Image (cartoon, rainbow, N blue to C red):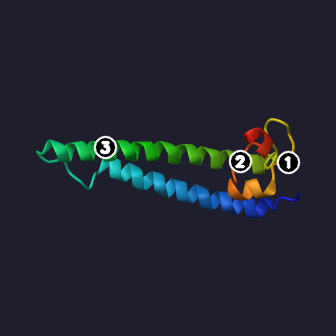
Amino acid sequence: MSIDFDAAKQELLKLKEEYETRIDKIEDHIQHPQDSLNEHWEDQAISYRQNDMRKNLLGEARQSLIYVENALSRIENGTYGECEVCGEPIEEKRLEAVPYATLCMKHAE
């Protein structure tokens, strides 16, 4: 297997930009909700639920961004594409599907 590190880096940088944009948009929605609260408790309940959902999505996006940044660091230090458990190469198809994968298929199960 031969990893194209330049292509992997470009894909990870693209993902990083997507997650940063997503985080900015979610944070903006949380700080400046488009659906201002009014006097009806039902509307308030919906707004609170939407805000909770936004906070969950924000947490997921932040975690994904960390994964991507860690993968970029692994490219820089020469360990990208190596399983953290066994040190064997991570399958190419797995890296295509999950570019920030840290485990081979055997250890990901």
Residue 10's image quarter? bottom right
Give the CA distance from mark 1 to mark 2: 11 Å
Asked if the residues shown at circle 3 and circle 1 are in contact, with their CB atoms under 8 angstroms apart, the answer is no
- What residue type is disc 3 on? Arg
| Residue that badge 2 annotates | 101
Is residue 104 in sight in this rendering?
no
| Residue that badge 1 annotates | 89
Residue drawn at 85 percent across, 48 percent down: 89
- The quarter of the picture where the N terminus appears is bottom right
Residue drawn at 78 percent across, 49 percent down: 80
Question: Would residue 91 appear left or right of 70 to someone viewing this image?
Answer: right
Q: In the rendered view, would you say 109 is above or below 3?
A: above
| Residue that badge 3 annotates | 49
Q: Position of residue 42 (x, y in %)?
A: 18, 44
Q: Where is residue 67 in the image (x, y as percent from the top left)?
A: 63, 45
Q: Where is residue 77 in the image (x, y as percent from the top left)?
A: 79, 46
Q: Position of residue 63 (x, y in %)?
A: 56, 43
Give the CA distance from mark 3 to mark 1: 43 Å
Secondary element under disc 2, as helix, strand or loop, is: loop
Give the CA distance from mark 2 to mark 3: 32 Å
Is residue 63 in sight in this rendering?
yes
Residue sitting nearer the eye, 54 or 78: 54
Q: In the rendered view, would you say 23 is above or below 8?
A: above
Secondary element under disc 3, as helix, strand or loop, is: helix
- The quarter of the picture where the C terminus appears is top right
The mark nearer the N terminus, 2 or 3, is 3
